[in-house]
Amino acid sequence: MEDNNTTDTAKNNNKAMTYEDVLLKLEAISIKLESYTDYPQSASNNAKRAIEYKEENGSDCGTRVGWTRARQLADKKPISRETISRMASFKRHQQNKDVPYSEGCGGLMWDAWGGTSGINWAINKLKQIDKNKK
């Protein structure tokens, strides 16, 4: 007779993962390989401010990946090269960074991803990492 816990685990392992789930799992693996914590304190502070706003006021803004990023930055957790690359690519949202938190998602999510200091650090760090790998 089959153990129910084994059956339940097998069923859960066969569930289709979302794209965000896959990204989070891959990120966890890559953090073990190489990770960085030298992002500016201001990036952590920006993420903390965004998290505090969401907790106090509620918000439908952002994705689970975005809020995971905010939590990593706020807690000064190590981040992978892939994460740094995603932070750098968030620059495309810069035109919305000045939208007040209460008026839309632009400023809130900009800060969740580290704000200007975090995005600029990511762009420069990515260049540094890739230059050192050559």
Image (cartoon, rainbow, N blue to C red):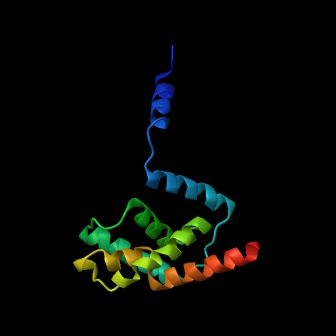
Q: Quadrant of residue 70?
A: bottom left
Residue 31 point in image, percent of width and height = 62, 61
Residue 74 point in image, percent of width and height = 47, 73
Q: Residue at x 34, y 81 (%)?
A: 96
Viewer-closest of 70 and 30:
30
Residue 114 shows in this picture = no
Answer left or right for 123 relative to 66. right
Q: Using the image, determine if residue 117 lies above or below residue 76.
A: below
Viewer-closest of 106 and 76:
106
Answer left or right for 104 relative to 67. left
> How many callouts does the rendering have?
0
Residue 108 shows in this picture = yes
Answer left or right for 73 relative to 56. right
Viewer-closest of 127 and 63:
127
Q: Quadrant of residue 110?
A: bottom left
Q: Using the image, determine if residue 18 lies above or below residue 121.
A: above
Which quadrant is home to the C terminus?
bottom right
Residue 97 point in image, percent of width and height = 36, 83
Residue 33 point in image, percent of width and height = 68, 60
Q: Using the image, determine if residue 42 lies above or below residue 113.
A: below
Q: Residue at x 45, y 31 (%)?
A: 11
Q: Using the image, determine if residue 37 lies above or below residue 10.
A: below
Q: Residue furthest right?
A: 134
